Image (cartoon, grey):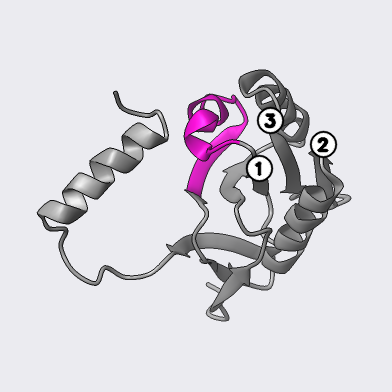
Protein backbone atom coordinates (compact mmCIF):
# COMPACT_ATOMS: atom_id res chain seq x y z
CA UNK A 1 0.00 0.00 0.00
CA UNK A 2 1.27 3.44 -0.91
CA UNK A 3 1.58 5.53 2.23
CA UNK A 4 2.53 8.73 0.42
CA UNK A 5 -0.75 10.62 0.37
CA UNK A 6 -1.03 14.37 0.70
CA UNK A 7 -4.25 16.19 1.52
CA UNK A 8 -4.73 19.90 1.08
CA UNK A 9 -7.33 22.61 0.55
CA UNK A 10 -7.65 24.43 -2.78
CA UNK A 11 -9.53 27.74 -2.65
CA UNK A 12 -11.58 28.48 -5.75
CA UNK A 13 -12.34 31.89 -7.23
CA UNK A 14 -15.13 32.91 -9.60
CA UNK A 15 -17.20 35.98 -10.46
CA UNK A 16 -19.04 37.51 -7.53
CA UNK A 17 -22.80 37.03 -7.79
CA UNK A 18 -22.43 33.70 -9.61
CA UNK A 19 -22.83 30.18 -8.23
CA UNK A 20 -20.63 27.14 -8.70
CA UNK A 21 -21.58 23.48 -8.83
CA UNK A 22 -18.76 21.00 -8.29
CA UNK A 23 -19.27 17.36 -9.10
CA UNK A 24 -17.81 14.12 -10.34
CA UNK A 25 -18.68 12.36 -13.54
CA UNK A 26 -17.34 9.40 -15.46
CA UNK A 27 -17.20 10.33 -19.15
CA UNK A 28 -16.34 13.28 -21.41
CA UNK A 29 -19.91 13.11 -22.76
CA UNK A 30 -20.75 14.99 -19.55
CA UNK A 31 -19.56 18.27 -21.07
CA UNK A 32 -22.14 18.22 -23.85
CA UNK A 33 -24.92 16.67 -21.75
CA UNK A 34 -24.68 19.29 -18.99
CA UNK A 35 -24.59 22.04 -21.62
CA UNK A 36 -27.79 20.64 -23.16
CA UNK A 37 -29.42 20.49 -19.72
CA UNK A 38 -28.55 24.14 -18.99
CA UNK A 39 -29.60 25.41 -22.40
CA UNK A 40 -33.01 23.78 -21.98
CA UNK A 41 -33.59 24.45 -18.28
CA UNK A 42 -33.42 28.21 -17.75
CA UNK A 43 -33.89 30.77 -20.54
CA UNK A 44 -31.06 33.31 -20.41
CA UNK A 45 -28.76 31.26 -18.16
CA UNK A 46 -25.08 32.06 -18.66
CA UNK A 47 -22.50 29.45 -17.78
CA UNK A 48 -19.01 28.08 -18.06
CA UNK A 49 -18.22 24.40 -17.58
CA UNK A 50 -14.92 22.57 -17.25
CA UNK A 51 -14.38 18.81 -16.91
CA UNK A 52 -11.11 17.07 -15.99
CA UNK A 53 -10.67 14.05 -18.22
CA UNK A 54 -9.20 11.13 -16.22
CA UNK A 55 -7.81 9.02 -19.07
CA UNK A 56 -5.51 9.90 -21.94
CA UNK A 57 -5.13 12.52 -23.22
CA UNK A 58 -6.17 13.87 -19.76
CA UNK A 59 -7.38 17.25 -21.01
CA UNK A 60 -9.59 19.83 -19.32
CA UNK A 61 -12.68 19.85 -21.54
CA UNK A 62 -14.86 22.97 -21.58
CA UNK A 63 -18.19 24.28 -22.81
CA UNK A 64 -20.38 27.29 -22.15
CA UNK A 65 -21.97 30.42 -23.51
CA UNK A 66 -19.92 33.05 -21.63
CA UNK A 67 -16.17 33.29 -22.24
CA UNK A 68 -15.35 34.73 -18.79
CA UNK A 69 -17.28 31.97 -16.99
CA UNK A 70 -15.67 29.27 -19.16
CA UNK A 71 -12.22 30.65 -18.34
CA UNK A 72 -13.03 30.75 -14.61
CA UNK A 73 -14.35 27.16 -14.69
CA UNK A 74 -11.17 26.04 -16.46
CA UNK A 75 -9.04 27.78 -13.81
CA UNK A 76 -11.00 25.99 -11.06
CA UNK A 77 -10.47 22.67 -12.84
CA UNK A 78 -6.77 23.39 -13.29
CA UNK A 79 -6.32 24.36 -9.62
CA UNK A 80 -8.03 21.20 -8.32
CA UNK A 81 -6.74 18.85 -11.02
CA UNK A 82 -8.85 15.86 -9.95
CA UNK A 83 -9.80 13.32 -12.58
CA UNK A 84 -13.45 13.21 -13.61
CA UNK A 85 -14.31 16.36 -11.63
CA UNK A 86 -16.40 19.12 -13.16
CA UNK A 87 -16.83 22.78 -12.33
CA UNK A 88 -19.93 24.62 -13.50
CA UNK A 89 -20.23 28.37 -12.91
CA UNK A 90 -23.68 29.85 -13.54
CA UNK A 91 -25.04 33.38 -13.83
CA UNK A 92 -28.69 34.51 -14.17
CA UNK A 93 -29.91 31.32 -12.45
CA UNK A 94 -29.52 29.52 -9.14
CA UNK A 95 -28.37 25.93 -8.59
CA UNK A 96 -31.89 25.05 -7.43
CA UNK A 97 -33.04 25.76 -11.02
CA UNK A 98 -30.76 23.08 -12.55
CA UNK A 99 -29.47 20.79 -9.82
CA UNK A 100 -32.03 17.99 -10.15
CA UNK A 101 -31.53 17.84 -13.91
CA UNK A 102 -27.75 17.68 -13.47
CA UNK A 103 -28.04 14.98 -10.80
CA UNK A 104 -30.17 12.92 -13.18
CA UNK A 105 -27.57 13.14 -15.98
CA UNK A 106 -26.49 9.55 -16.55
CA UNK A 107 -22.76 10.32 -16.32
CA UNK A 108 -22.92 12.35 -13.08
CA UNK A 109 -21.75 10.22 -10.17
CA UNK A 110 -21.68 12.80 -7.37
CA UNK A 111 -22.35 16.44 -6.56
CA UNK A 112 -19.95 17.83 -3.96
CA UNK A 113 -21.55 21.25 -3.60
CA UNK A 114 -23.62 24.01 -5.15
CA UNK A 115 -22.83 27.40 -3.66
CA UNK A 116 -22.07 31.08 -3.99
CA UNK A 117 -20.10 31.03 -0.72
CA UNK A 118 -16.32 31.06 -0.45
CA UNK A 119 -15.28 27.50 -1.31
CA UNK A 120 -12.33 25.24 -0.60
CA UNK A 121 -12.00 21.84 -2.26
CA UNK A 122 -10.27 19.22 -0.13
CA UNK A 123 -7.92 17.37 -2.46
CA UNK A 124 -5.99 14.15 -1.83
CA UNK A 125 -2.96 13.54 -4.02
CA UNK A 126 -1.07 10.27 -4.56
CA UNK A 127 1.51 9.19 -7.13
CA UNK A 128 -1.40 8.33 -9.48
CA UNK A 129 -3.15 11.69 -9.37
CA UNK A 130 -5.65 13.78 -7.45
CA UNK A 131 -9.15 13.25 -6.11
CA UNK A 132 -11.73 15.36 -4.30
CA UNK A 133 -12.39 14.11 -0.77
CA UNK A 134 -14.72 16.88 0.34
CA UNK A 135 -15.49 20.58 0.41
CA UNK A 136 -15.51 23.46 2.85
CA UNK A 137 -18.51 25.54 1.80
CA UNK A 138 -18.78 28.96 3.44
CA UNK A 139 -18.25 29.46 7.14
CA UNK A 140 -19.05 27.70 10.43
CA UNK A 141 -22.33 28.55 12.24
CA UNK A 142 -22.20 31.48 14.65
CA UNK A 143 -25.42 30.72 16.51
CA UNK A 144 -28.97 29.43 16.18
CA UNK A 145 -31.67 31.41 14.38
CA UNK A 146 -34.15 33.31 16.50
CA UNK A 147 -37.68 34.42 15.64
CA UNK A 148 -36.50 37.49 13.69
CA UNK A 149 -34.10 35.30 11.69
CA UNK A 150 -36.92 32.84 10.91
CA UNK A 151 -39.10 35.70 9.72
CA UNK A 152 -36.33 37.02 7.45
CA UNK A 153 -35.70 33.50 6.04
CA UNK A 154 -39.38 33.05 5.21
CA UNK A 155 -39.58 36.52 3.61
CA UNK A 156 -36.44 35.94 1.55
CA UNK A 157 -37.77 32.65 0.13
CA UNK A 158 -40.97 34.41 -0.90
CA UNK A 159 -39.05 37.34 -2.41
CA UNK A 160 -37.12 34.86 -4.55
CA UNK A 161 -40.33 33.13 -5.54
CA UNK A 162 -39.50 29.74 -4.00
CA UNK A 163 -42.40 29.84 -1.54
CA UNK A 164 -45.82 31.44 -1.72
- Which image quarter: residue 142? bottom left
Q: Is 163 within the magenta?
A: no
Quarter in which the C terminus is drawn: top left
Residue nearest the viewer, comparing 13 with 81: 13
- Viewer can see residue 49: yes
**Residue 16 in picture, x, y percent from top left:** 63, 59
Dot in front, 3 or 2: 2
Q: Residue at x 59, y 24 (%)?
A: 106
Q: Which contiguous range is marked in magenta? A: 93-113
Q: Is 106 within the magenta?
A: yes
Residue 5 vs residue 43: left or right?
left
- For marks 3 and 2, give the CA distance: 12 Å
- Residue 132 vertical placement versus 160 (above, below): below
Element type where label 1 sits in the image: strand
**Residue 122 in picture, x, y percent from top left:** 52, 68
- Viewer can see residue 55: no
Dot in front, 2 or 1: 1
Q: Which mark is residue 34?
A: 3
Q: Which mark is residue 91?
A: 1
Q: Residue at x 33, y 32 (%)?
A: 158
- For marks 3 and 1, give the CA distance: 15 Å
Ranked by sequence position, the earlier of labels 3 and 1 is 3
Mark 1 is surrounded, within 10 Å at the Cα level, by few (under 14), some (14 to 19) or many (20 or more) other residues, namely some
Amino acid sequence: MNKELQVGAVSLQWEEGCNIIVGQSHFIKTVEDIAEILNGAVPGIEYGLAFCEASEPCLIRSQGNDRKLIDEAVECARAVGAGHSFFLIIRKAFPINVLNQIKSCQEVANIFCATSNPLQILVAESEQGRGIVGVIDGFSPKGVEGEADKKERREMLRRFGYKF
